[in-house]
Amino acid sequence: MVTSQLPLWSDKDATEGWSVRESQRARRLTVRVFHTGRVEVVVPSRTSPRAVERFLERHRPWIERKREEARRRAGPPVPFPPPQVALPACEEVWRVHLAGGSGRARLAAATPGLLALAGDANKGQPVRQALRRWLTERAREVLAPLLAQCARELGLRYERVLIRRQRTRWGSCSTRGTISLNCCLLFQRPAVVRYLMIHELAHTQHMNHSRRFWHCVARYCPEYRSLDRELLDGWRRVPDWVFGDEAS
Ligand SMILES: [Zn+2]
């Protein structure tokens, strides 16, 4: 975090979720406005504060327009802890039961479809962490076998699968054949999840987004264009607790 570099236009900016992230890998300055209205600026290391300021000045109208859109789209505030967690990818809905008790929040799958949240449910951060741990675990249980099945159908091989919780990527495939899947895929439709898996498996053949790569994807998933668009928009279907109130 290099918040000290952040040129803020008003006090409101500081409270409405601006963050500046310094990145070793970034080649240029970028800015994203999330559906929640949160703004994230990614800054390559050794960029001068002045350059960041100029960049943001230039993009200010665009940022404001996006934030306005986000505000307009935002529905009523959702309760926390969430009364239930819906996972469209595997067509599950888990009810969250507040079991009471004291101490640090703990989460356990009591029976399929029922999560028992024990301990202090009023402290937001431990509850979010417990939910995230469970989400990653559930993603491993659901997504790993799906990927294996998908690979068998396509006759493609990968070495191993990692489940990650990332803000910006749905999946990736390394040159060594490791496929990473974002646990937030659980909040997407099965068809969208299948497309992402086909996409990553196709990377085991083509480590790029060339015409041949997309041919390979299209062979198994003819409607890949619309599904790719849906996935791009898929962050909107991720509940706030997955990333909320977390140092980035
Ligand atoms: Zn790709």
Image (tube, rainbow, N blue to C red):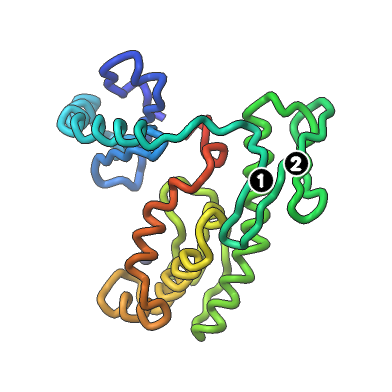
Left/right placement of residue 96 relative to residue 154 reads right
Residue 216: percent from the left, percent from the top?
A: 36, 80
What's the residue at 50%, 64% (across, down)? 193
Judge by depth and name the residue closer to the eye, 83 or 196: 83
**How far is disc 1 from disc 2 in space, using C-alphas?**
9 Å
Residue 32: percent from the left, percent from the top?
A: 32, 40
What amino acid type is highlighted by mark number 2? Leu
> Which label is found at residue 208?
none
Up-down: is 239 above or below 171? Answer: above
Counting residues from the start of the chain, the first of labels 1 and 2 encountered is: 2
Helix, strand or loop at label 1? It is helix
Up-down: is 236 above or below 190? Answer: above
Residue 9 lies in what quarter of the image? top left
What's the residue at 44%, 69% (across, down)? 195
Residue 45 makes an appearance in the image: no
> Which label is found at residue 107?
2
Furthest-bottom residue in view?
155
Residue 39 lies in what quarter of the image? top left
**Label 1 CA crowd tier, 10 Å (few <14, some 14–19, many 20+):** some
Asked if labels 2 and 1 touch by Cβ distance under 8 angstroms, the answer is yes
What's the residue at 55%, 41% (across, down)? 242
> Which label is found at residue 133?
1
Q: Quadrant of ligand 1?
A: bottom left
What's the residue at 63%, 29% (across, down)? 125
Q: Quadrant of the N terminus?
A: top left
Residue 214: percent from the left, percent from the top?
A: 31, 75
Count of numbered tags: 2
Residue 146 makes an appearance in the image: yes
Residue 245: percent from the left, percent from the top?
A: 53, 30
Furthest-top residue in view?
11
Up-down: is 189 above or below 69? Answer: below
What amino acid type is highlighted by mark number 1? Arg
